[in-house]
Structures are given as C-alpha cells and as structure tokens.
Image (cartoon, coloured by chain):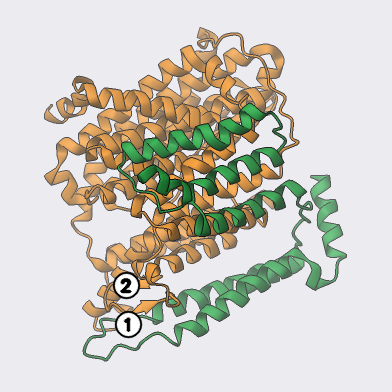
Amino acid sequence: MKNVQKQKRANKSLPFFFRDEFKVSFVIIFISVALLITTFTFDIVPPILNRGIQPATFPKALLVLIIAMTLLIYYLATKNPWKIQKELPKSFFLTLSSFLIFLIISKTLDFFLAISVLSIFVSYCWGEKRIFYLLLVGIIFPVIVFIFFETILGLRFPPGIITNIYYS
Amino acid sequence: MDNLLLMMAPLFNSKLLLVLFFGTLFGLILGVLPGLGPTTGGALILPFTMTLDPLSAIVLLTSIYCAGTYGGAITAVLINTPGTPAAAATCLDGYPLAQKGEAGRALGMATVSSTVGGIFSVVILVFFAPILAQLAYEFGQPEYFALAIFGLTMLASIGEGSPIKNLIAGAFGILISTVGKDFMTSIDRFTFGINELTEGIGFIPVVVGLFAMSEMLTQSTLINQVFNRIALKAIKLPSKDDYKKTWKTILRSSGIGSFIGVLPAEGGTVASLIGYSEAKRFSKKPEEFGKGSIEGIAGAEAANNAATGGAMVPTLALGIPGSATTAVILTGLIIHGVRPGPDLFREQPDFLYGIFGAMLIANVLFFIFGFFGAKIFARITLVPNKILWPMIFAVSVCGTYSLNQSIIDVWIMLFFGVLGFFMRRYGFSVVPVIIGLILGELVEGTLRQSLVIFDGNWLMFFTRPIALTFFILSLIALAFPLIRAKKIKK
C-alpha cells in the first residue's frame, strides 16, 4: 500500500505530458477522433431505405461517449494520479518483436515455419537453452498441432515453402 | 419428471460421458495454470468443437467452465497465485492455511465448497432459466435494448479495473462489433478498404488475442519470478468441526454466487469477492480472516462456483452472457446454429436439460478429480513458462486460423494481444471488451428496430414498463461503484 502511494507521488512529480494518465488518455482520444472523422465518410442512406438511424450515427455516439469518458478519467487522474508502471524488461520487447517476425515470415515464407521460428525464439529468449526442449517447442509440438488440425479438422494451411512440400 | 430424465441423459450416453470426462480434465488443467482459465481455454477449444454435435460441443465448453473455475483454487492455495481471477479471494486464506502445514485441509474445503456451490447453482439454473425464458416472451425490441444496456452498465462493477475504464472498454467492444457491413443497410463501416473486414471482426481472434496473447506478453515480463510452492501430501476431506463452522457460509455464498452469476456480465470474480466479504461479516471470528480462516476459503470458493450455473441463466434464457466464459459458450451455441432464448426452451428441451445434467455431472467429476488428483494437477504448475507459452502460441494461432481459414484473423489476434497487454497494464480490464463485442450487435440492432417501431421518438422507450425497469436498474448499476467507494472511505 505504502509502495503504491510512493509510486503515485512519484508520478505526480512528473510534467503532465510524461504521466501515464496523459499518454493513455491522449492515445485513446487521438484514435477516437480519427475514427470519428472516418465516420463522416460513411455512405448516407436515402430516407426511404433508412431504418431508424443512419449507419454512422451509432458509431459516432459511441466514439463521443468514449472521448467523454476518457476526459473524465483524465480529470479524475489529475486528483488521484495513477501509480507509475515498472519499466518493461528486455524479454517483453523480444517477445513483442517475435510477433513481428511471425507476421513477416508467415506472409513471405511459410505459416508453419513462422510458428516454429517464434516458438524457438521465444523459448530461447525466456531462458531455455536445452536443445531438446527447443526442438520440442519449435518442431515436435508444432508438427503434432499441424497434423492434428490437418487430419481431424480437415484444415488446409496457407501455402508456403514447407506446407507446399507436405501438400505435394 | 420428464425433465429430470432428460437431465440424466448424459449419464447414459457414452460419447457425452467421454466429452464430460475430457472437458472436466482439461478445465482443471486450465484452471490450475495461472494466466490461462476457462475463458481462454474455451476460446481455444471452440474450433475443435466443430467436429462435435451441438450438445457435445456445449457440454465440453460448460464442463471446462465448471472445472476451470474450481481448478483456480489449487494454485491459489499452493502458490498464492490464483489460477483464475475468480480464485483471487481464495488466496487470502488458502495460502496462509497452507503455510501452516494444512494445505490438504485448505484444498479439501475448497473442493467441497466448490462442489456444493456448483450443484446449488445448477439447481437454480434448472428452476429459474425456464421462468426467465417465459418472461422473455414479453420482451420486444425496446426491452431487449434496455436489457443489453443494463448488461453493459453492469460492467461498471465487475470488480477488475475502475468503473469508468470498464465502461470505456465495454464501449470499445461495441465499437468493434460495428466493423464491417452494416447489417441493416449493407454499408461498409471501418473497413478501410480491406475486403476481409467487410464480414466484421470475429469473436475468437479477439478473445484469444485479449486473453491468451496478452497473457503471453505479461508472462514475458515475469520470467524471473519465482513461486514459493507449498508441498501437498494429500487432500483431506473437511472434519466434522470444519463442516459445523462452514455449512452456513457455504450455503450463503452459494446463494450469493448464484444471484451474482445471474446478473448480466458479472461472474465468478465479483461473486467470490462478495462471498468472501459476507463470510467475514457473518463470522464469529472475523479476525482470523486473512490468516488462514477455513470459512474464508469456503465463502470464496462456494460463491465462485455457484456463479457458473447462475451465469448460464441469462445466457440460455436471453442470449445475454452472464460472464466472459459464458460469452464464449454463447458463441459456441451460435456457431453450432443454436439460438439461445425462450424458443430454445420450448423447442429443444432435451438439448437444454442435457446441458443442465452435464453441468451437474461436471461438478461431481471435478470433485472426484480434485480429491484424488489435486497432487498431480498441482505438479502441472511446474511446467516452465518458457516451454508452455510457445506451445500455447502454436495452438492459439492454428485455432484462430482454423475457424475461417483466414490469416487476417491471426493478425487481428496478435493486434488484440498487444492491445490487451497495454490495456491491462494501465488498469483496463479486457473482459468488458468481450461482453461489449458480443452485445454490440444486439444493442445496435434493437435500438434501430425500436426507433422504427417508435417512429424515431426516443421518449417512447420510457413508456414501456419492462424497459423502464431495466433503465432504472442501469442507473443503479452505474451508481453502485460510487456508493461502494463512499462506503469504503467511511
């Protein structure tokens, strides 16, 4: 409890634009406003086809509500600041970047290969150095999952360098 | 009598029994593993249910729900980390009692009270779901709109996160449901020219992303965390003295849990917190709470398991999820072509009572598994995260891809994983997003159809007594966190 109070006080001493509550509120409002602007580009339905309200009205109302509530949480946070979050460790950024690697490999090379690469990469970054376990999570288990989905669910995985060999 | 026979049907169907057996076992494993749970597990298993008939599929999901809710207690008692959020209150007394060398007694009480709570809630479900379904015949579009609004305002008090943050998350969930072709006019909304988005954003990629992937990112920040695991010799049934001390608490918490469960969007987490605090309030020895009170364990565990049956009441009778996991079950029903609501009770009683019976049996099964296998399940927590999470990733990706065979779904899942991580980091619960997403179409559809009925006159909503009642309840739901905060301050 004392620790939380300390973190809150530390947060209060920061300039407002460095505080989490400002950054989070800003991001939410920025995205909401961008989406709100987008809603003005939605097609307008002629009155004869329009049932109740225009298709853009409901999302507009929701976005205005989100903006209003975000302003409210920011206002409340100025009175009762959020506690400062601990800095994210290197392992988090490595895991996050593994998602990106997965996206690139699955798009350009192979879906199955992407799963294997991510599994080995994440397991290694989280501290697993034993070859057998890396092979287990990176090859043996994905192969089991692949065969299971392929045979039981009749799933066809997207084409790629490894998947094509299997299907041919 | 007929209904009772229908309820017993799963006992005489070897396939359903097998499904129940595996569902309960899988649910227990999910419940034991911190970060996973019945919601994530249900979402991951959903694609597999496509190979099953509708009853088996829903029986599988509900048995995971019942067993997963109980499974959280094992980790709560032994490593002071709730396996599921609903077991958070169990840590308060379960772990201190285990530290005193009475882990077996703590788990025994958790198992018995969970089973009693679960069975009690199934009885409530059997009696109240048909009554609620009957009432639902009185509901028109305006009433359904008001009910959905009530469900959403209940998000303000779901226990995790601040009320306003929960409401923002809920509104965001509804906003996601508007992506794609407008169902009334076929006009594209938020598709940004991406063809795959015209069908909208699927439920499974969002659930798996928000729960499994965001948890994977959370676990990546905790790789150096060491758990102090207490050794378990054997689970013990509560003594006569323990029963004497706790029977009233178990019954009270079962009632509380069932009631909280029935409320839309609320679930086991709120139920267990209220069950625990009420157990403390009525206890002759409240000073023992937090130091290993057997009543504390009974209060929390009976309530969270009682919420499972309660949460199924609005899910089956109205199509409004009672909790995050029942939102997954609701999706399962829809995927299998079953439309929840009053007609289901009239047209498919065998299906419904089959589910009720399966839930009853699942509660008995997890008692047996828990009693004889808690020691083995506790060992599952020893699987290192560096092995477990890459495997979960592989299953999540393939499961998400399999539903529509769409790589875009996998990207959406990863996007929501990152988003979910940051939401949780800054105190936004991810549960409201799921509830908002599932209620979104209902809210918008019923609003627009109501306005057609009312010829655009919004005030007509307040001329309908049932709708007005739900609006008043919504106001109470919004005011409740404020009243609670003031009470705590005092």
Q: Position of residue B246 (x, y in %)?
A: 52, 20
- Residue B442 lies left or right of residue B345; in this view the side is right
Q: Are marks 2 and 1 on the same chain?
A: no
Q: Which mark is residue A53?
A: 1
User: From the viewer's perspective, is residue B410 above or below residue A42?
Assistant: above
Q: In which quarter of the image is residue B184?
A: bottom left
Chain letter belonging to callout 1: A
The amino acid at mark 2 is: Leu
Camera-side residue of B462 and A11: A11
Q: Does the CB distance between marks 2 and 1 fall below 8 Å?
A: yes
Chain (orange):
B
Q: Nearer the viewer, residue B453 or B209?
A: B209
Residue for point 22% across, 65% down: B140
In the image: residue B378, left or right of residue A125: left
Q: Position of residue B230 (x, y in %)?
A: 68, 18
Relative to B345, is B146 on the left or the right? Answer: right
**What mark, if any, has residue B447 been given in the picture?**
2
In the rendered image, residue A167, in percent from the top left (x then y), is placed at 36, 45
For chain A, what colour was chosen? green
The kind of residue tagged 1 is Ile
At mark 2, the secondary structure is helix
Quadrant containing the N terminus of chain B in the rendered view: top left
**Marks 2/1: CA distance?**
9 Å
